[in-house]
Amino acid sequence: MPRALITGINGQDGSYLTELLLDRGYEVHGLVRRVSTLNRSRLDHLYNNPQIYGQRLFLHYGDLDDPTTLRRILVKIEPDELYHLAGQSHVGLSFEIPESTCEMTAMGTLRLLEIMRDLNRPPKLFHAASSEIFGRPEKSPQDELTPFAPVSPYGCAKAFATRMVTIYRETYGLFACNGIMYNHESPRRGENFVTRKICHAAAAIKLGLEKELMLGDLTGRRDWGDARDYVRAMWLTLQHSVAEDFVFATGQLHSVQDVVETAFKTMQLDWQPYVKRDARFIRPAEPLQLVGNAAKARLLLNWEPKTSFSQLISEMTNLELSRLAVQSSKPVGA
């Protein structure tokens, strides 16, 4: 039974990757932070299944700023594969907390690499890099050879981590790969991300629970895909015979307004009376023309996204409607 360790297992990608690996017969270990609450909502269906948790799924307390604990966990588990997904992943928030963003995202990755090179049998490493490393690129679409030009603290931290993975692969012979992931969403996306915010608002307005949606710049465009396609890409990267870096993207740009229009259309609503502009949500620096060329992944990994943009946003909005309908029908205090 192959054994995998996932940092950031509680996140959107971590939860989907856990399901994929369990389906493929893995024993899965996850790194979780010790906090005052026990909210593991994305993993609850697995955590509460006695046939899975404690049998093939195990969670370990640890932090990326605690190398002693990280080393102890890696030595104890001896994973075959390490999927490094953890870090402060909200781009806008990174302008508010740049030091902790760099500490977790940049230095946390370096600590893992340092531990790995000391192990007798280091695992294969997948590092979840980001299109934010390209910032404002000179060419579009971007590929694995596009120079880094980050414009946010998050992008800068990811650029450091991504380059360190390459350095440790070339210097110490680690099987260490970067997956340069473009924006990917799902019904499990965090509520502070714009796609989830829009889908939630459209459903809430449909049910009469909210009256308006406040957004920043509607013209900002991204290469948005489905998180479930992207965790499949993570696994395929580590099954490849050679450690390499790959861009994972749909190759299509959509604006924030496209998300709004699709979500409100799903709810059979005209979006324009409800959407208001709020300058507080505009970032100090915004990436431009971030759209990826995943030709290398298609050729070497036989990977391509399966879910269209409209399918994804419609699914997210309909599931928000179902959630809100159930919540609004509960008695007060339930």
Image (cartoon, rainbow, N blue to C red):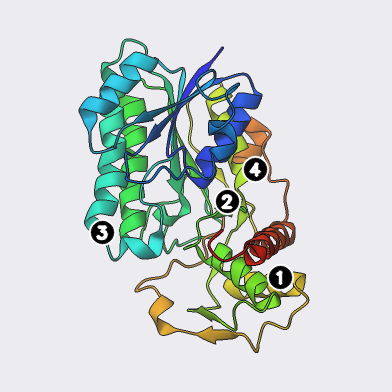
Q: Position of residue 3 (x, y in %)?
A: 50, 18
Crowding at label 2, few (<14), some or many (≥20) Cα neighbours within 10 Å?
some
Q: Looking at the image, tell me whether mark 2 or mark 1 is earlier in sequence order.
A: 2
Crowding at label 3, few (<14), some or many (≥20) Cα neighbours within 10 Å?
some
Q: Name the residue under label 1.
A: 262
Find residue 98 and name its label: 3
| Mark 2: secondary structure | loop
Q: In this view, does 287 lie to the left or right of 236?
A: left
Q: Name the residue under label 2.
A: 188
Q: Kindly check if marks 4 and 2 are in contact, taking CB atoms under 8 A apart as contact.
A: no
Q: Kindly check if marks 3 and 4 are in contact, taking CB atoms under 8 A apart as contact.
A: no
Q: Is residue 40 left or right of residue 235?
A: left
Taking the spot 59% from the left edge, 28% from the top edge, the residue there is 49
Tell me the quadrant of the picture where the C terminus can be found.
Answer: bottom right
Residue 258 seen by the camera: no
Type of amino acid at the residue the image marks with label 3 = Pro
Q: Nearer the viewer, residue 259 or 266?
A: 266
Type of amino acid at the residue the image marks with label 4 = Asp
Type of amino acid at the residue the image marks with label 2 = Arg
| Mark 1: secondary structure | helix
Q: Looking at the image, tell me whether mark 3 or mark 4 is earlier in sequence order.
A: 3
Q: Kindly check if marks 4 and 1 are in contact, taking CB atoms under 8 A apart as contact.
A: no
Q: Looking at the image, tell me whether mark 4 or mark 1 is earlier in sequence order.
A: 4
In this rendering, the answer to whether 172 lies above or below 144 is: above
Q: Name the residue under label 4.
A: 229
| Mark 4: secondary structure | helix
Q: Position of residue 326 (x, y in %)?
A: 67, 60
Indicate which label's residue lies in the foreground, 2 or 1. 2
Q: Where is residue 24 in the image (x, y as percent from the top left)?
A: 64, 22
